[in-house]
Image (cartoon, rainbow, N blue to C red):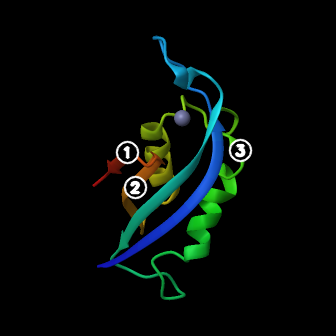
């Protein structure tokens, strides 16, 4: 089994749709800090789990300098974004089994999948 760990950051704004009073419902931005863990028992034809630049392309290529509410089809909480990241990087051969998404230094979401 091979494991790849990739760290990247992206800047993006969002506002949350919440049924209670919260400053997070106001438009604001974060410098998101993301670490993903991918595993595969079989390598691709290039001998990789997934090219590091492909990981960046699939995530930062969509999210960096974006308004998350416009590019993601759900309430863009850190939890929902972490699950979306895992889905973006998982296919028949590769599983993105853990995502650590840090919204700010004190607030991190960890999503895991089998
Ligand atoms: Zn926020």
**Label 3 C-beta lies within 8 Å of the nearest ligand 1 atom:** no
Q: Name the disc covering residue 99, or none.
A: 2
**Reading the chain from its start, which is encountered first: label 1 or label 2?**
2
Name the residue carrying label 3. 66
Left/right of residue 3 with respect to residue 45 in the rendered view: left
**What secondary structure is marked by label 2?**
strand
| Towards the viewer: 110 or 54 | 110
Tell me how many marks there are. Answer: 3
The residue at the point 48 percent across, 83 percent down is 48
Q: CA distance from mark 1 to mark 2?
A: 8 Å
Asked if residue 65 can be seen in this view, the reply is yes
**Residue 90 seen:** no
- Find the residue positioned furthest to the top: 20
Mark 1 close to ligand 1, CB under 8 Å: no
Ligand 1, what quadrant?
top right
Q: Is mark 2 within 8 Å of ligand 1?
A: no
Residue holding disc 1: 109
Q: Which mark is residue 13?
A: none
Do residues under tags 1 and 2 come within 8 Å of each other at their CB atoms? yes
Q: Nearer the viewer, mark 1 or mark 2?
A: 1
Residue 97 lies left or right of residue 83; in this view the side is: left
**Residue at (43%, 45%) from the top-left corner?**
83
Secondary element at image label 3: strand
């Amino acid at each position: 089994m091979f494991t790849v760990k990739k760290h990247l950051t992206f800047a993006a704004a969002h506002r949350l749709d919440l049924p209670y009073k919260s400053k997070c419902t106001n438009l604001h931005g974060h410098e998101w800090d993301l670490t993903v863990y991918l595993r595969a028992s079989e390598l691709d034809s290039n001998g990789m789990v997934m090219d590091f630049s492909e990981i960046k392309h699939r995530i930062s290529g969509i999210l960096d300098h974006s308004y998350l509410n416009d590019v993601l089809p759900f309430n863009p909480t850190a939890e929902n974004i972490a699950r979306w990241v895992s889905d973006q990087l998982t296919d028949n051969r590769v599983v993105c089994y853990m995502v650590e998404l840090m919204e700010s230094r004190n607030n991190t979401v960890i999503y895991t999948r089998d």
